[in-house]
Structure formats: structure tokens, C-alpha cells
Amino acid sequence: MSDPLEQLSQQARDAMPRHVAIIMDGNGRWAKQRRFPRTIGHRRGLESLREVVRTASKLGIEYLTLFTFSAENWNRPKSEVDTIMRYLARFLRTEIPEFNSYNVQLDAIGQIDRLPEKVQNQLAKTKETLSGNDGLTMVLALSYGSRQEILDATRSIAAKVKSGELNPDDIDEAVIANNLYTKDIPDPDLLIRTSGEMRISNFLLWQISYAELVVTDTLWPDFRSPQLFAALEDYAKRHRRFGKV
Ligand code: IPE
Ligand code: IPE
Ligand code: MG
């Protein structure tokens, strides 16, 4: 592929977001339209993920957070959950050389201890293998729910208050941010949701306070570099005011 930067206007290059977050939705509908089982949609979705990670890393984006499996997705049929977990473990194993060649690092947010051991082990292994890289950080949100994250943070802050380590008057936004799973990650600048749903579905509620939102009707398995470029062009035209004039 040619340099993806050449596919962008000067305006979009100058306004490159530091952190892009994506709600990767629509795998099931993509499959249904083709009379395939939903799991085929998930498999195709991982191909989109692969391409988007590669392109984002070449564009110089620093963080790419991907809503891969929500805390609520555990309520899906067991067979679908099992297949997603199997695909995920395989993806984390087989993509290592690809990620390495683009200098990509890996991080994960969510209730990781709820994942099958096989996925947890592969996650740790892949993370470790890529730990020497210093390019794009791919953050996988796995068994992730924003309310659960805020709950966990509240519990750990309350424990610090109880032990006398923290004074209630000293709880500020930074204290809360530092107790979230995303503590070392800057807030997203751009949030993309595919498949046309106009909702957040319990994703990064605290962190997206001032993110620009782009919703595209494209289903995730059809979301590739051109759709990422379109979202970045859209983002570049926004005027972020952060409550000011
Ligand atoms: C997103 O696609 C993948 C996950 C949530 C795991 P969906 O599986 O939600 O696809 P739709 O929304 O049913 O089309
Ligand atoms: C959000 O998609 C979660 C992921 C993309 C992993 P869902 O398909 O689970 O969300 P809803 O059900 O449309 O809100
Ligand atoms: Mg969905």
C-alpha cells in the first residue's frame, strides 16, 4: 500500500487525532445480509481490525482503542461467545509478526480476569512480545463496561479514603482518571461507531466527554482504510471548543 498520509488532505494531516476510539459494530448484520452465520461476520471483522491498525500506525496515530467485547456481550449465546474468544486468541497469536513490523504495542482494558484463561495467556504473551515497540498503542477493550470501570474506580478510591491514604477533599478529576483502567492513556479525540447506531453502549463514558463523534452506516467488516480516511476528514473539519467560545 502507498503511504496512507497521501490519501489525506493537508487539513486532515494537520489535525491528526492523537487517540482514536472505535465501537466496531455490525458484524452480525454483515453476515446476516449474506445469509452467513454471525461468526463469519466476526471473522471478517478481525480483517478490518488488522487493516485499520496498520493504517492508523502508518498515519502516526498514537492510540487506537477498539471496543472488541463488552461486559454485556457475555449475555450472548454461549456458542457465539466461545467462537469470538477462539478467534480472539488466534488473532492475538498470529498477528504478532504483522504488529511487530508496524512497531505496534498492545494494551487491554476491561475485566480481563473474566476472559478464558487461553485468551488471558495469549494477551499477556502478545503484550510482552510487542513491549519493545514504541509506535501505535492498540488498546483492546475486552469484557469492558464503562459503568463497571467507574464502579471499580470508586471502590479503590473509597478504600484509600478508609485507610487514611486519601482525604475526600483531595478527590479531583485527576484522582478519578488515575483509578480508571485507562489511567496511562490520554482521552480519545475521535470516537467512531460503525453500523449506524447512535449510541455509546457503555463505552468510555468518562473519557469521551469531549471526543468528536463520527457515526458511519458502514458495517464493521466493510470498514477499511478509505472509511478511516473519511472519518479523519470529517474530524478535521470540526471546531473543538471545549466549552469555550
Ligand atoms: C460487533 O458486532 C461485535 C461484538 C459486539 C462482539 P455485532 O455482533 O454486535 O453485530 P450486530 O450489531 O449484531 O450486527
Ligand atoms: C457494542 O456493540 C460492543 C462492541 C462493539 C464490542 P453491541 O452490539 O454490543 O451494542 P448494542 O447492543 O448495539 O448497544
Ligand atoms: Mg452490535
Image (spheres, rainbow, N blue to C red):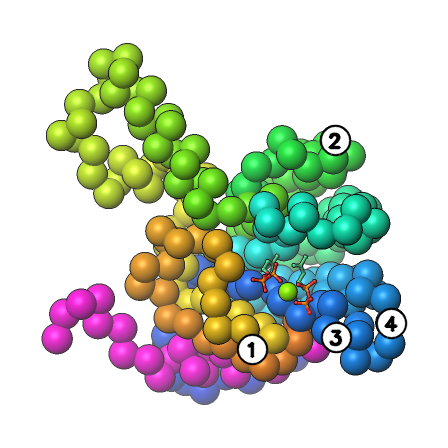
User: How far apart, in angstroms, are the residues tagged by discs 3 and 2?
Assistant: 29 Å
| Marks 3 and 4, the one that precedes in the sequence | 3
| Marks 1 and 3, the one that precedes in the sequence | 3
Determine whether 34 is above or below 165 in the image: below
Callouts 3 and 4 close, C-beta under 8 Å:
no
Which residue of the protein is positioned furthest toward the right in this rendering? Answer: 36
What kind of element bears circle 1?
Answer: loop
Callouts 3 and 2 close, C-beta under 8 Å:
no
User: How far apart, in angstroms, are the residues tagged by discs 1 and 3?
Assistant: 13 Å
Identify the residue position indicated by label 1 in the image.
Answer: 196
User: How far apart, in angstroms, are the residues tagged by discs 1 and 2?
Assistant: 34 Å
Q: Position of residue 150 (x, y in %)?
A: 39, 40
Callouts 1 and 3 close, C-beta under 8 Å:
no
Callouts 4 and 2 close, C-beta under 8 Å:
no
What kind of element bears circle 3?
Answer: helix
What kind of element bears circle 4?
Answer: loop
Q: Magenta residues?
A: 222-245
Q: Amino acid at mark 4?
A: Phe
Identify the residue position indicated by label 3 in the image.
Answer: 30
Residue appearing at x 32%, y 59% in the figure: 209
| Marks 3 and 2, the one that precedes in the sequence | 3
What kind of element bears circle 2?
Answer: helix
Determine whether 111 is above or below 93 in the image: above
Identify the residue position indicated by label 4 in the image.
Answer: 36
Q: Amino acid at mark 3?
A: Trp
Kindly tell me whether mark 3's CB lies below 8 Å from ligand 1: yes
